Image (spheres, grey):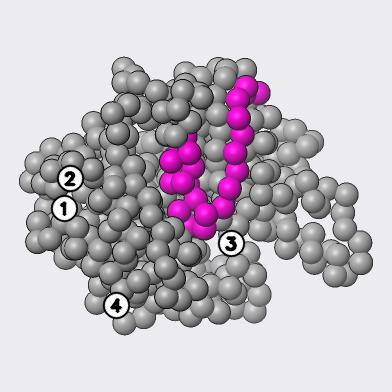
């Protein structure tokens, strides 16, 4: 990947918070963000936005009459995008592309409109325009008054990293100089929780660490859902204000053995990691931020894929889902943020209940993985 792509800003809101200092402080703690919440007739652990982020979203919703009709997935994306573009020095009316995707999109709003339709036999006037998949990027563009292309998509849980791939492609093709990319998800609804329970992957734990992401010895699935959004600003060239550089990108799909799982050794991950690494010496990769959703098969197959690629000399391995849960389409960009923070702070953040790993050298290169239903794997190699 000869053309340098700079990440000049990254912003998010999740259970970890909505500004770098708070987010980093929470990453250094062994506390998780899960709370028991009623969904239908049962409680489930979820990772909602922190209190400050909830207040920010409420203020945003009330700042414009049009915003009151929008789903939280859109509002989350607007809030994160405002901060990222300010941090990058992009201004209102600038020309830049936007690709912010979502696995589920306007989940809560769609369920509400459908329930109203079942009750009354009529659909609300704004039911369609406020629940379409393209809703997120178009509203972010409206809010930022940007000039440039808008793309929205869903590629399940690898959506945010596919957005990053799209941004890189546009920049390298010379079709844009700047691109805002990421994902947003607001999936904490009765129906979504019920769907995860139907797959028998939702956590029933209530111990100190209820989501056992990257625990390769676990006997039960322990996926927990979280909500949030994360976006980053990409610019062509080696920028002085760059937080990190995209050194390699990889992607792959595989023939499905089952509707919701990848192969025993995650062939798609092996291919995506090898593509992202290119000619990079494996010993130069300091950390891998795993997708690791907290399911028995999901965690183990990714680990086996890493073993296949790296052999016995594994980099440091980590994930953030034990702390903030699985945010579906936003999860990959939240992992990118974690990687950028580790590069910037030069501190490895591990998983407290996993086998101890120790940082023995400066962090220079970090590989980030994401995959979704359908075996859609993406790997991104970041460097300082």
Left or right of 10 on screen, residue 290: left
Q: Percent position (x, y) of residue 345? A: 24, 36
Tell me where residue 17 sits by quadrant: top left
> Is any atom of residue 107 visible in this view?
yes
Left or right of 313 on screen, residue 226: right
Magenta segment: does it hold 147? yes
Residue underneath mark 4 = 218
Q: Are marks 4 and 2 in contact (CB under 8 Å)?
A: no
Q: Are marks 4 and 1 in contact (CB under 8 Å)?
A: no
In the foreground, 187 or 205: 187
User: Tag 1: Cα neighbours inside 10 Å, few (<14), some, or many (≥20)?
Assistant: many
Magenta segment: does it hold 36? no
Q: Look at 48% across and 57% down and name the residue there.
A: 157
Q: Are marks 1 and 3 in contact (CB under 8 Å)?
A: no
Tell me where residue 300 sits by quadrant: bottom left
Q: Look at 42% across and 75% down and name the residue there.
A: 257
Residue underneath mark 3 = 188
Tell me where residue 309 sits by quadrant: bottom left
Left or right of 149 on screen, residue 349: left
* Range drawn in magenta: 145-167
Q: Look at 66% across and 75% down and name the residue there.
A: 40
Where disc 1 sits, the SS reads loop
Q: CA distance from mark 4 to mark 1?
A: 22 Å
Q: CA distance from mark 4 to mark 3?
A: 25 Å
Where disc 3 sits, the SS reads loop
Q: CA distance from mark 1 to mark 2?
A: 6 Å
Q: Which mark is residue 285?
A: 2
User: Tag 3: Cα neighbours inside 10 Å, few (<14), some, or many (≥20)?
Assistant: many
Residue underneath mark 1 = 315
Disc 2 vs disc 3: which is toward the camera? 2
User: Tag 4: Cα neighbours inside 10 Å, few (<14), some, or many (≥20)?
Assistant: some
């Amino acid at each position: 990947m000869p053309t340098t792509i700079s990440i000049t800003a990254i912003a998010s809101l999740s259970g970890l918070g909505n500004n770098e200092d708070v987010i980093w402080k929470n990453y250094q703690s062994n506390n998780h963000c899960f709370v028991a919440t009623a969904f239908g007739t049962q409680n489930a652990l979820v990772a909602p936005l922190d209190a400050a982020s909830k207040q920010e979203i409420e203020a945003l919703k009330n700042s414009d009459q049009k915003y009151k009709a929008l789903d939280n997935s859109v509002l989350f994306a607007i809030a994160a995008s405002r901060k990222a573009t300010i941090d990058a020095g992009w201004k209102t009316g600038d020309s830049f592309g936007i690709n912010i995707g979502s696995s589920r999109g306007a989940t809560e709003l769609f369920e509400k409109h459908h329930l109203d339709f079942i009750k009354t036999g009529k659909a609300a006037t704004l039911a369609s325009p406020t629940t379409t998949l393209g809703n997120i990027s178009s509203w972010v563009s409206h809010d930022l008054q940007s000039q440039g292309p808008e793309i929205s998509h869903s590629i399940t849980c690898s959506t945010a990293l596919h957005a990053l791939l799209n941004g890189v492609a546009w920049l390298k093709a010379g079709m844009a100089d700047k691109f805002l990319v990421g994902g947003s998800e607001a999936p904490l609804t009765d129906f979504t929780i019920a769907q995860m329970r139907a797959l028998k992957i939702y956590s029933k734990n209530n111990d100190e660490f209820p989501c056992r992401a990257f625990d390769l010895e676990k006997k039960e699935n322990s996926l927990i859902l979280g909500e949030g959004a994360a976006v980053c600003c990409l610019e062509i060239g080696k920028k002085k204000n760059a937080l990190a550089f995209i050194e390699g990108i990889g992607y792959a799909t595989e023939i499905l053995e089952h509707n919701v799982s990848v192969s025993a050794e995650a062939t798609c991950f092996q291919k995506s990691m090898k593509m992202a690494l290119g000619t990079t010496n494996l010993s130069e990769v300091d950390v891998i931020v795993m997708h690791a959703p907290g399911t028995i098969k999901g965690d183990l197959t990714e680990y086996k894929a890493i073993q296949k690629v790296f052999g016995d000399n594994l980099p440091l391995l980590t994930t953030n889902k034990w702390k903030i849960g699985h945010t579906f389409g936003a999860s990959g960009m939240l992992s990118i943020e974690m990687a950028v923070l580790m590069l910037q702070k030069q501190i490895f953040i591990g998983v407290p209940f996993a086998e101890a790993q120790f940082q023995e050298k400066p962090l220079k290169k970090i590989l980030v993985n994401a995959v979704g239903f359908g075996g859609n794997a993406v790997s991104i190699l970041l460097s300082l």
